[in-house]
Amino acid sequence: MTHRDYAWLAPVAALALAAGIWIGRSAAGWLVFIPLLLCAAAACWLLRWPQRFAAVQAVVLAVGCLLGYAAYHPSLPREGEYTVSGVVAEEIRLREDGQVRTLLRGVRLNGQSLLSGAYWSFYLREGETLPEGLAPGCSVTLTARVYHPSPASNPGGYDFREYLLQKNVTIGVYGVEELHTADGWHPLGIAAAIRHSLTQGLISAMGETAGGYASTMLLGSQHLIPDEDRQAFSRLGIAHILSVSGFHVSVLAGLVNWLFRRLRLSRKARFWSSGALLAFYCLLAGLSAPVIRAALLFLLYEFGALRHRQRSSLHLLCVSFLAQLLVSPVQLTSMSFHLTYGAMLGLTLVTPWLCSLWEPRRFRRVWSTLCAALGAQVGVLLPGLYWFQELPVLGILLNTVVLGAATGLIILCWVVLFLLPVPALATFVGQLTAGLMNGMLVAVGEMSSWPGITIWTCQGGLLTAAAWAALLLAMSWWWPGRRRWLGLVLSVVVLAASVYPWPDTGSRYVQLSVGEADAAVLQDQGYHVAIDTGEDGEELAGYLHQRRISLDALVLTHLHTDHAGGVAELMSRDIPIKTCYLPWDALETQADEDVMDMLAELAASGTELVELGRGERIELPNGSITVLWPEAGKVRQEQEANESSLTLLAEVRGSTLLLTGDLSGTYEMYAAAPADVLKAAHHGSENSTSQEFLQAVAPEMLILSCGDEARSLSMEERRGDIPMADTRRDGCITIEFQTDGFNVETMW
């Protein structure tokens, strides 16, 4: 076995481990992987090279499967009430609705230690303040309910469970009864207290806005960045500036290395000193996975230099990839993991070839910087298309300019941080830095509003990944010279085709899981209708954005925030809406003031507002939507908006679907009509969807959009023998319409 053969073990093993973890993530059990591991291990012992190479990769694959299953299916304590103790290891975040949330480490449940952390949340009453003594780093003991965090309940939706697993958190804790606080001594708690103190110092020296950004870029305090600013950076393809990543760690490592060189430390002393400082920084950042990744890469490179060994960037990348996944397999599905290794892969494979295309006598550094920016952009192309469904038009140019500006700002922010013991000097430098940072924020906000600054695409899939891999190879030194441009053109064409919004010829109804709210999408051969938006609109906007869906119609059954509050999110995500349909006389009846303001903004953006009443229709390519309620003259203006909920009978490919909004039992018989599928009214409330109404509609299937267990149980008692799908229990509900009937599928 030659050195070249050994060299190829790491890249292939990295792919095998990732594939194994992915398989284990969705596996139903782990025992099936044991025979694979034993057979592969025996083959490693018995076979010779090159067959042994394949056997080694089979071992890595089997190990990945076992690690993936264990990481994504951890053993959990039973749900219920416990005496919980732990140390607050993160900033305490307070939402506008009064929700308080943070992370606990060193958790004990009824005195029994938990190996992982806990996500702790509770609500403050109106006018109530945080409990005395509750701060980052403190120890807490309380009585609370332990629950298991839920996975994604909608296709492509936010997976809260995996997000917590990536932070080594496996349970949720809700409540604040019998709370006692004391000083805590957990390392991550102490780091959180230091981080909180430094953040307050930066805000004091630089102002709330600039100080918040400085804390985010140095310490990873993500909660200090407004959502609209985050979206602006994302639209320009520079969102990585806002989270501590390899770029930020490389700036710090460069500063440290420069300082140690000035102190004339030996290479060995520089290595160990840098390692100690980076280890402390990782702890200070809360053992953030991106920080650990970047620190590991830097130390591996420096270790190679220390031992005078040839350093292959690709192999160093693979070694760090393997090390990270062996320690924390759940990082495989992390967005930051994809962006980090995508960018590094682009820098490793693409940048050298780009630099070889032209060797200018002047401005070599400028050219190499542009090549590095382009290489990184090619590397993050796939993660960007998958996570954001956007292709920044000016990404390459902006990355070159912004990275230079951000490097200077980060250095200045570190200077301010180290000057905090001298308040006057820290404030002077801090205000100078704040002025520069605010100027950058104004420029980013202005550029992000330019029309056409990004290309909106569909979410990337397996074909996109294959085309991206081919593009990387075509732009690397591995590809044969004569066929390079052919491979380059073909990979770009396939990549573009894979994210193009091809017409959808199917017909389906998708009832999204949005808790005690309502949001759905009816698709019929390329015609798209959203029925209600949910309270915040995030799930609906995410579903539409991932599929590059523009709305031909938005139907708001009534103007309560749990049905119409998400209009603002649709507008902020730039989802085009041709027409918005409202119940008859809705703008004059009772409605939430915030919803009225959103409708005014929607109309100002060019969307037509149309009121509907009984008998009116919306035509579909393979059917129609008929309004059954409200009927003019039947509802008094002073009555609750629920009583005027639009009730719709959708006929698609011969099947019928009755949608009832929040209509109560007082008026529901006016809207009763036979239907194949019935969506229960008002989230299953006892005051709606009576047995008389069920008998009149006689549905084959009942669906319920609900987040409350009591309402689900109430609907279970009334439904009789009618099959029911419930978003609280089943997640997103999808009904596929065909000419010979319909099929119902659920997320869980």
Image (cartoon, rainbow, N blue to C red):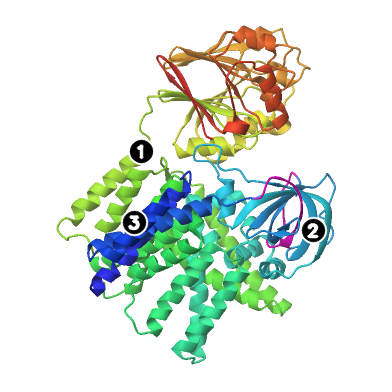
* Amino acid bearing label 1: Tyr
Say the numbered circle drawn on residue 45.
none
Determine the residue positioned at 74% across, 44% down. 97
- Residue placed under numbered mark 2 in the picture: 141
Residue 294 is situated, as x and y percent measured from the top left of the image, at 48, 68
| Residue 99 in sight in this render | no
Mark 3 or 2 closer to N-term? Answer: 3
Q: Is residue 239 above or below residue 293?
A: above
Q: Compared to 72, does 416 lie above or below?
A: below
**Which of the two residues, 480 or 314, is positioned nearer the viewer here?**
314
- Kindly report the distance in space between the C-alpha atoms of the residues bearing marks 1 and 3: 43 Å
Give the SS element for disc 3. helix
- Tell which tag, 3 or 2, sits nearer the viewer: 3
Q: How many marks?
A: 3
Q: CA distance from mark 3 to mark 2?
A: 49 Å
Q: Are marks 2 and 1 in contact (CB under 8 Å)?
A: no
> Which residue sits at x=49%, y=85%?
270
Q: Are marks 1 and 3 in contact (CB under 8 Å)?
A: no
Q: Residues within 10 Å of mark 2 (few under 14, many from 20)?
A: many
Q: Which residue is mark 1?
A: 500
